[in-house]
Amino acid sequence: RRRSNGEGSYRINKKKNIFEYYERYVDNDGIVKRKHIRAVSREELDKKVDAWKRQLAEGNMAEDKRITVAEWADRFLAIIKPTVKAKTYDHYMAVTNNYIKPGLGQIRLARLTTEKIQLWINGLVEKTNLSPATIAKFRRCLVTIMNVAMQYRIITYNAAYYSKPPRMPRTQPPVLTLEQIRRLLSVAARDDFQQVRLVEPHRRGEDAIFLHRVYFVGLFLSIFVGTRRGETFGLTWNN
């Protein structure tokens, strides 16, 4: 049977006639360690393994039981900084400092419940002008922060995972009329669009022709084929 992630491995030591269990885990300081448990029978070994896993899950370090959301958020930022892009780190830092810490920072991480998180989300909906999509991003950020806390054995479950994001309103996308489509293509066909004016004067002729081809063909495809912006500009002339 294939072992699941973090399950560890069992084996029988025939030379010593004992049962053994091995598992790699991450301690509270982020250090990868290896646990080795021995017993004279499989039943006794299972009891020892279960007891050790309960002890690990409960997070026996008193300081981690008392850590607040704000304190863990700062540790989280320090942990992920070398592992993510600068833009991603800036996003986490902005959301953490401007919304998560002011709203939930004083609560102990181990006592942060789904109800408290849901009330925080609802408060952002009711008391700010933020869009539901933006608030949903804040929630996903909190889910990530608490997932890392689980990996470091500081909490045993992610309360943010069970919270609900704000309801996304259904919006009707704008649809161009036939007359608007004709006007748009007419402007594009005349090279009368802003991007051409940004080209350096000594290259304007060559680049204007290129931009005309790119933007006119892109508009034409988007209108009559229905391609999205990323799909349109991902095409090559061979396509």
Image (spheres, grey):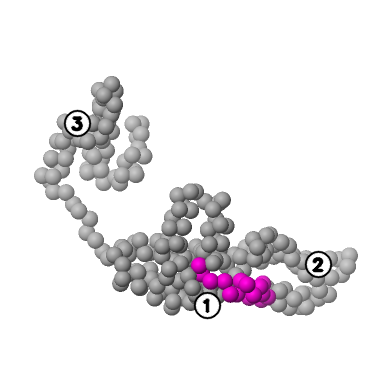
User: Crowding near pointer 3: few (<14 within 10 Å), some, many (20+)?
Assistant: some
The x, y position of residue 83, in whole percent, is 55, 51
Q: Is residue 97 magenta?
A: no
In the figure, residue 25 lies in which quadrant? bottom right
Quarter of the picture containing the N terminus is: bottom right
Whichever of callouts 2 and 3 sits on the residue coming sooner in the sequence is 2
Task: Tell me the amino acid under the disc marked 3.
Answer: Asp
Q: Quadrant of the C terminus?
A: top left
Please identify the dominant SS of the magenta region: helix
Residue type at mark 2 is: Ile
| SS type, badge 1 | helix
**Residue named by callout 2:** 12
In the rendered image, the vertical position of residue 74 relative to residue 211, given as above or below? below
- Residue at 58% across / 75% down in the picture? 66
Q: CA distance from mark 2 to mark 3?
A: 78 Å
Camera-near label (3 vs 1) is 1
**Residue 124's disc number:** none
Label drawn at residue 111: 1
Q: CA distance from mark 3 to mark 1?
A: 62 Å
* Disc 3 target residue: 191
Disc 2 secondary structure class: strand
Residue closest to the far right: 15
Question: Nearest the camera: 82 or 174?
Answer: 82
Mark 2 and mark 1 in contact? Answer it, CB < 8 Å.
no
Q: Are marks 3 and 1 in contact (CB under 8 Å)?
A: no
Marked residue nearer the N-terminal end (2 or 1): 2
Callout 1, which amino acid? Arg
Q: Residue at x 23, y 39 (%)?
A: 220
- Can residue 213 be seen in the rendering of this structure? no
Residues shaded magenta: 54-70
